[in-house]
């Protein structure tokens, strides 16, 4: 898409109207909520000292148990931006937090604790922050949004994930749409190239800003979410006979340039892949809404070289290991484009509660595209991965222990692609901080 074709208006909001707390204060917090916050932070500290993780989940959970209104009270007076969707939440929220931090303090659930308890912990940790950037699980978006009156919501995509927990995608999209219909003061930034996201955002009561962020995975939206008929796609534009169609975006990418009708801003990213250019587009657009100039936001976003351990490279013995996270078919579709065909590969898959118990999604990944290279199937479901690689005609060895699997590969650079719990377990074993 060229940089002069859009005529859509870019929505802005006046920063001068912000009502933000002074450093160290929470307006109207109250003694009971303050006590609940202190109790949560004490428990979180104990969890960290015991080596049980960051403590954000248990700390926030304790605070909410003592005061169910804590999220509403802690978010009062701030500009809250929620980032949600199936894939890209963590990266986009880090990008947006970096952009806003160029203007002031930001509360951010950077550890990836993306339910209400993680949001509470992040807000409690930064009482001085005028902004809050909160990554929110798509199944919890309605609940969190209802309690924190967000200034904006960034809605990235909606695809299959954790089928045993999330059911089918349209149901999730419908729930999000119903939530957006109750938020007249919230501006929604939505991906115009994902039909499920467009249908959900179309229910919004407040303004919607469309971004042409692309969609490398469309297998979950071949039919219209509104009427069920097959979607028609011509020249990368999808539509349905019922009238649902790709909106004209106000923000789009032209190669490595972020475009609006009024401006062109170069992107120079430290993170790989087209999917991260798309994430950056959404972050820059949302930051602009919060009165951060696009060039300033782009510079802050470009300084990121890893996000919560993703894309980090670490030396271990004979190998330099690069870690990537892919947890579903859509995530793998984006990851495949980032993999260097010359690098050996470890694929590690678990199926714990946080991953989803159902591993049938492996059969929707185009593993044949990996081509011939030294390869290992690993994780607690290494056998499932091994069977899938065999059906794709790929030679490999199998070892449930990712580090043992790694040791059997040739020396040099190696990519390790793992799903959620396999990724974080390996991250800890390699000594990479979340």
Image: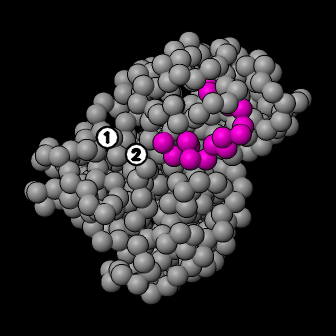
Q: Is residue 125 visible?
A: no
Q: Residue at x 13, y 46 (%)?
A: 229
Comparing 231 with 124, the one in front is: 231
- Quadrant of the frame with the C terminus: top right
Comparing 404 with 186, the one in front is: 404
Q: Is residue 205 visible?
A: yes
Callout 2 environment at 10 Å: few (<14), some (14 to 19), or many (20+)? some
Q: Residue at x 52, y 54 (%)?
A: 275
Q: Residue at x 33, y 41 (%)?
A: 219
Numbered circle sitting on residue 404: none
Numbered disc 1: secondary structure = loop
Q: CA distance from mark 2 to mark 1?
A: 8 Å
- Residue 346 colored in magenta in the image: yes
188 lies above or below 58: below
Q: Is residue 373 left or right of residue 179?
A: right
Numbered disc 2: secondary structure = loop
Q: Is residue 169 left or right of residue 97?
A: left
Instruction: Tell me which colouring the rendered structure shows.
Output: one colour
Q: Is residue 171 left or right of residue 110?
A: left
Q: How many marks?
A: 2
Callout 1 environment at 10 Å: few (<14), some (14 to 19), or many (20+)? some
Read off the residue under disc 1.
220
277 lies above or below 167: below
Q: Is residue 96 left or right of residue 70?
A: right
Read off the residue under disc 2.
217
Q: Marks 2 and 1: CB-CB under 8 Å?
A: yes
- Residue 102 colored in magenta in the image: no
Q: Quadrant of residue 160?
A: top left
Q: Which residues are magenta?
A: 333-348
Q: Quadrant of residue 386?
A: top right
């Amino acid at each position: 898409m060229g940089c002069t074709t859009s005529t859509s208006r870019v929505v802005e909001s006046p920063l001068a109207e912000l009502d933000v707390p002074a450093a160290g204060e929470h307006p109207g917090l109250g003694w009971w909520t303050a006590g609940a916050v202190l109790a949560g932070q004490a428990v979180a500290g104990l969890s960290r000292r015991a080596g049980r993780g960051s403590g954000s989940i248990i700390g926030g959970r304790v605070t909410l148990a003592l005061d169910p209104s804590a999220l509403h009270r802690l978010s009062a007076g701030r500009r809250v931006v929620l980032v949600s969707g199936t894939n890209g939440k963590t990266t986009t929220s880090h990008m947006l937090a970096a952009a806003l931090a160029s203007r002031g303090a930001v509360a951010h659930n950077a550890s990836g604790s993306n339910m209400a308890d993680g949001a509470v912990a992040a807000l409690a940790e930064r009482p001085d922050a005028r902004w809050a950037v909160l990554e929110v699980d798509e199944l919890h978006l309605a609940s969190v949004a209802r309690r924190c009156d967000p200034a904006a919501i960034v809605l990235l995509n909606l695809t299959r994930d954790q089928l045993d927990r999330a059911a089918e995608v349209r149901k999730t999209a419908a729930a999000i749409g119903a939530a957006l219909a109750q938020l007249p003061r919230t501006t929604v930034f939505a991906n115009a190239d994902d039909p499920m996201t467009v249908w959900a955002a179309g229910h919004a009561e407040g303004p919607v800003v469309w971004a042409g962020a692309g969609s490398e995975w469309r297998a979950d939206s071949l039919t219209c979410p509104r009427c069920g008929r097959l979607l028609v796609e011509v020249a990368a534009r999808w539509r349905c006979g019922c009238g649902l169609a790709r909106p004209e975006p106000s923000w789009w990418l032209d190669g490595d340039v972020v475009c609006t009708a009024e401006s062109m801003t170069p992107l120079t990213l430290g993170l790989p892949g087209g999917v991260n250019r798309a994430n950056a587009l959404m972050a820059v657009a949302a930051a602009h809404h919060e009165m951060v100039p696009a060039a300033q936001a782009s510079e802050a976003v470009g300084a990121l070289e890893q996000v919560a351990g993703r894309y980090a490279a670490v030396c271990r013995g004979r190998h330099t290991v690069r870690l990537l996270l892919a947890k579903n078919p859509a995530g793998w579709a984006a990851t495949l484009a980032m993999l260097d065909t010359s690098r050996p590969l470890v694929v590690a898959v678990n199926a714990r509660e946080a991953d989803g118990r159902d591993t049938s999604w492996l059969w929707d990944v185009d593993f044949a595209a990996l081509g011939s290279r030294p390869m290992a199937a690993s994780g607690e479901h290494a056998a499932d991965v091994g069977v899938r690689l065999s059906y794709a005609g790929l030679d490999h060895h199998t070892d449930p222990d990712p580090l043992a699997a790694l040791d059997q590969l040739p020396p040099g650079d190696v990519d390790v692609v793992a799903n959620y719990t396999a990724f974080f377990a390996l991250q800890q074993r390699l000594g990479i901080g979340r």
